[in-house]
Amino acid sequence: MGRSVSAIGSIASVSVAARRHKLWRLLSPLLGYDCDVTGATGHTADDFADYFKRKVSDVRSATAAQPPPPPSSTAAPSTLTSFRPCTQSEVRRIIMQSPVKSCTLDPVPTFLVREFIDLLLPYVTMMVNGSLIAGRLPDSHKHAIITPHLKKSGLDPTDLANFWLISNLTFLLKVVERALAIQLNALVACQEVLVLGLRIAFSESARDLGVIDREKSLTAHVAAVCQSSYYLLRHLRPIVHSLSVHATKTLVQAFISCCRDYCNSLLYGMSDGLRRLQLLQNAAARLVSGACWRDHIIRPVLQQLHWPPV
């Protein structure tokens, strides 16, 4: 009970601009998402390893008879034959912008790396560039702490297929990943990129922020926003009675309103999409105010919350 009260107090102090994953991490103990059910079912690391080995073998067996894709003779507009070394300023920026998270495999906690960044920066830069030039990580960093979690609450915990495995990687590996992402993102604007001999065609969503689909419509974006937002509203409903109105409003604005307002200027003139987002806002307002879903007059509630119509 003390843990729940402490979590509720922490939620109330988080501002609207706080990151959504931080709020969700605070909510997980209340919603029961951080419960370890693997110990109760007797699953071991070898069980998961054997399961995924069989899964990979099944995929290979099912695709063994398929012919390889035909090679493309057209030249890619942009090529990436090797990764360039990073400067110390780039590595510093990556480290300082990274979350302060650590893995038990890290030789030094992340907060100490940030605190003594001036002293450690030349060595970290050499390690990052060594991985970029060699095209692989050192063997000492090819490890991770694997934690199984149920994909959804209520699934059968005795079935290994109902779990996903979350990897806790070393901090240096995350720095290398971000350095690679920076160089790859510089080429995303191109239709195709030749990366180390492999042709990659970026989808439309990679170039238009995932909002406009191939038919130049926003229908898929609106549907995705509504689906994820209604999912979050259903999971917030059981705990709103333990929260103040201000805390509930903060959560709804962080989880729902931010997603709804993403690229909303592109929705101008899209009547069906605006209607669906308005219904989503009405549902969120009912959750915050405690109004009954049968109440069709929602405008006074929106005015009380200072939420303008979509």
Image: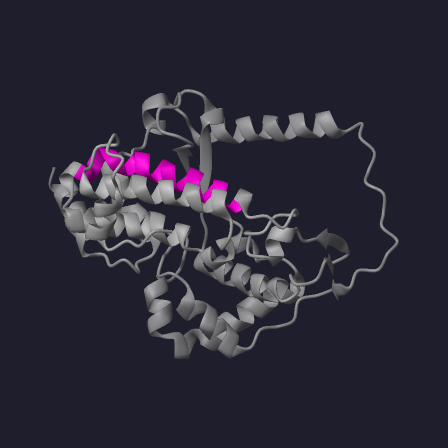
Q: For the point 47% across and 59% down, which residue is it? A: 265
Magenta stretch in the rendered image: 221-240
Q: Quadrant of residue 136?
A: bottom right
The single residue placed furthest to the right in the displayed view is 73
Residue 87, position in %: x, y? Answer: 55, 77
Q: Is residue 34 visible?
A: no
Please say if 160 is above or below 220: above
Q: Is residue 23 visible?
A: yes
Picture quadrant of residue 129: bottom right
Q: Is residue 236 magenta?
A: yes
**Towards the viewer: 107 or 8:** 8
Assign the magenta stretch its main secondary structure: helix
Left or right, 209 with respect to 15, comes to right
Q: Residue 216: x, y in percent?
A: 63, 50
Measured as percent of width and height from the top left, residue 196 is found at: 73, 58
The N terminus lies in quadrant: top left
Location of residue 111 with respect to 200 vertically, above or below: below
Q: Is residue 24 above or below residue 36?
A: below
| Of 53 and 179, the residue lying toward us | 179
Q: How many marks?
A: 0
